[in-house]
Every structure is written in structure tokens, then in C-alpha cells.
Image (cartoon, helix red, strand yellow):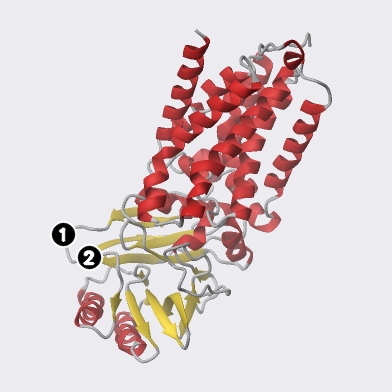
Amino acid sequence: MAFARSASAVLATAALYFFGTGLTPVPWLTWLAPLPILLLASRVPARSAAVAAFAAYSLGGANTWRYYAVDLELPVPLLAIPVLLFPLLLTGVVLLFRAVLLRGQALLAAVAFPAGIAAAEYLVCLATPAGANWSLAPTQSDLLPVLQVAAVTGGWGVSFLVSSLPAALAVARPRVAAAGFLVVGLAVGLGALRLATVDERSSPRITLLSARTDRDEVRVDTRAGRDLVAAYVDWLRTAPDDGTRIVVLPEKGFRADEATLPALIDPLVEAARTRGVDLVVGVTVTTGERTHNAAYHLSKRTVVYRKHHLVPGLEDALTAGTDLAFAPDGRVGIAICADLGHPEFGRAYGRAGAGLLLVPALDFTVDAWSQSRVQALRGVESGFSVARAARLGYLTLSDHTGRVVAQAATGSATPFTAVSGTLPVADGPTPYARWGDWFAWLCLVVVVVASWSSRSRKDSSEKDGEGTLTRSAG
């Protein structure tokens, strides 16, 4: 009977986590995922709870193993992050919840679990190249009222909310459960209010454009490269004028060096100026002994941005950039794909005054939804709209509330995939952009307090060998 109960909890949490997270999550399942394992944790010995939690989160996290190993081609040491580190951290948070609850501190346990989840995400973001891609926050990207708390707390607050309800229910105290629903209700209500007061004073029309190509960039000095340049130039010259003022092409569309770069830039500059648009093009460019993943913004003057956060394994031969880059008006910033997996990067642009970010991207088809929403979340956090053109994913226009204004999947039978829409240039940095990771640090403090509290005296269940819940009279 005990084994069947444990196995059921493991399978339930694993299934909910598998379908509630990953590349195409069902957002409401994310809210339920921890509940079965939390209900089990306080009713079995600590060792059994640890084994069950690790098994549940390992099985649930298997939804991204192939993506990390095959699509991203992560080196073996880095594969240990999703395969081992994530389940271990989550297991530790479950054990913290159990220890505090068995001391009769139901409210602290209900707070410690979501705080532990947010704190674990924050530490992973700081210590690994994964950034915040693993966070639960992007799973809620289609639930816009929930997402708005990120403008104050960062994505850590979204993860806290998602994890708070199952913890509040698992302690089996009506008042704690009511408090959990109240907190979530207030956050969602304020989020709905923010969505109803969106300011769109300056809204340029933007077109995201991607040619039908494979994963590898083409050299400018080859027949394929010259043909691709000519195709983009022809589109700029002949496409109907719909009022577009900015055109964004994907990441790594071309490969060039100092000698061949003019064969790419010069005709694109001429075509863009003739059409009256600013153009962003992604190119892998070698200058001297360094090769950068770069984005060239072609306007009144040429602005070059070099990608900061390179993908381990795939981009080991490249040199990372260090500077932010803005279009001449000073309100439109430039970034590249994986940069926006890192909240501190988005905050830097928010503090610098960016109201719109132009983002050439690559993607790997299977991650089209997840990557577009991770990067839209950065806009919610730090207060800018995102125009993101992926070569093997989604062309996505999202405003500073995370609302998707327009979207199209690349890879159609036509020579080009294009999507157009207007995006607001947001007014200024959010509280999160100004204050930084204050909420993550608060969660770390809660974890420390809960850990100290759980160790201040011996757990009664360990004294008598029982794994049952000891309830206080209060």
C-alpha cells in the first residue's frame, strides 16, 4: 500500500511536470505539478521523500533531455545541469518543505516551498550558462495577468506564484490555503489592471523577415551567399509598402570577413535607404583573429552589436561581445537570441532606456514557442517590446506586457516568411529593472530562515522512526 501510494505520487507529479514545463507547456498543469509529491513528503520518512521527489522531477524533466543533447549539442558536463542538478535542487526544496511542516509550522512551510523554487532558479541563473531558461516563469507566458508580476519581482515572482498554491494546499490548513489563494488573486488582479492601462504613444510598424534556408549560415562570397543577398534586396525593393519602418532579419544568416563584408552590407544599406526603413541583419563576422556573432543595424549610420551570451558547445569558437548597442534614436536596442535568456542582460537595456529591442535569432524549430516566450518575458521584466526574427522558429512581435501582437512560423514553402505589426516603444524601466533581483534575495532569506527553523530541534518523526505528520495544536 505504501509503495503504491508513493509510486502514484511520483507518476502524477512527473506527468504534470512533463506536460506543464518544457518546450510546449500546458500552463495550468504547472500549478498542479508539485502537489502529489508534497502531499506524500510529509507522510513518509525523509529518505523515501527524497527518492520520490528526485524520481518525479527526473522523469518530468526528461521532456527537454533530447533538446539539450541533440539540438543544442551541449557538452556532457553541461548536460548534468538538466539531468542531475535541477532534480537535486527541487528535491532539496521538497525536503525543506517537509522538515518545516513536520515541525508544525504550516505557514512557513507554505512560503518556504515557493521561495525555495525561486531561489533555486536564481542560483542556477547566476552559476550556469543556462540563465533563466529553466525557470517556471515562461510556462505562464500565455496567462498574461499572471506574468505581469515579473515587472516588479522578475520572473522569480512568477515562479513563486505558480509554486505557492500547491504548497498552500499541501499543508492541509484552510487558513493557509485561503492566504495562498488571496496572494495569487491579488497578483492576478493587479496584473489585469496593468494590462488594461497599456500606453502605446509611439508604435512603429515592424516587419520580421526570414528566407527559407537551413541551419548553417551561408558565406557571402559563395553563389548561395550572393543569391541570398540578392533575394533580400529584391524583397526590400518590390514588397508592397505597408508603412513598415523597421525590418529585422534572423541571426547568423550570413558568414563574412573584413574582405567580404561590404558585399553584404553595401547592397542592403542601399536597398534599406531607398525603401526608407532601418534594417537589422545577423552575420557571423571575422575581423582579425576574432569571430563574432553580430547584428548590423543599418540606418543613418551603421551600428554593430556583438552577442554577449554564446551557446556552450555550438559557439565555443566565437568571441563574446561586451557592449550594448542602440539605434541612432537611443530608444531602440539590439540583442541576439540567447542573450535574452539572462534577466540581468534585459535589466541592463531597461536601465539604459530601451523601449524596444530588435532581436535576430536562430532557434531549432522544436523550441520555437519556448524561446520566443522566454525572450518576451525579458520585455515584461524590464519594460521593452521585443521584435524577434528566428530563422528556424517563430517570427514574434510582443509588447512590454508580453502580449503577442503578431507571430508566424518559419519554414513555409514560400521563399520568405514575413510578419508585420506595430509595437509600442515603452516609456521607461520597470521596478524590476531599477531594483534588480530583490525578490530572489528575499526568497533566499526565507530559505535560510526555514532551514534554521527546521534544524532548531529534532524532528519528532525522526525520534520515534515514524514518517507521519505531527500537527501542532495552534
Left-right relation of 447 to 286: right
Q: Position of residue 32 (x, y in %)?
A: 49, 26
Q: Are marks 2 and 1 in contact (CB under 8 Å)?
A: yes
Q: CA distance from mark 2 to mark 1?
A: 8 Å
To which residue does mark 1 refer? 413
| Residue type pointed to by label 1 | Ala
Mark 1, secondary structure of its residue:
loop
Q: Position of residue 257 (x, y in %)?
A: 38, 86
* Residue 132: assigned label: none
Residue 276 in view: yes
**Marked residue nearer the N-terminal end (2 or 1):** 2
Up-down: is 106 above or below 65?
A: above
Q: Quadrant of residue 249?
A: bottom left
* Residue at the spot 20% in from the left edge and 57% down from the top edge: 412
* Residue 212: assigned label: 2
The extreme left residue here reads 413
Number of residues whose C-alpha sits closer than 10 Å to that of mark 1, classed few (under 14), some (14–19) or many (20 or more): few
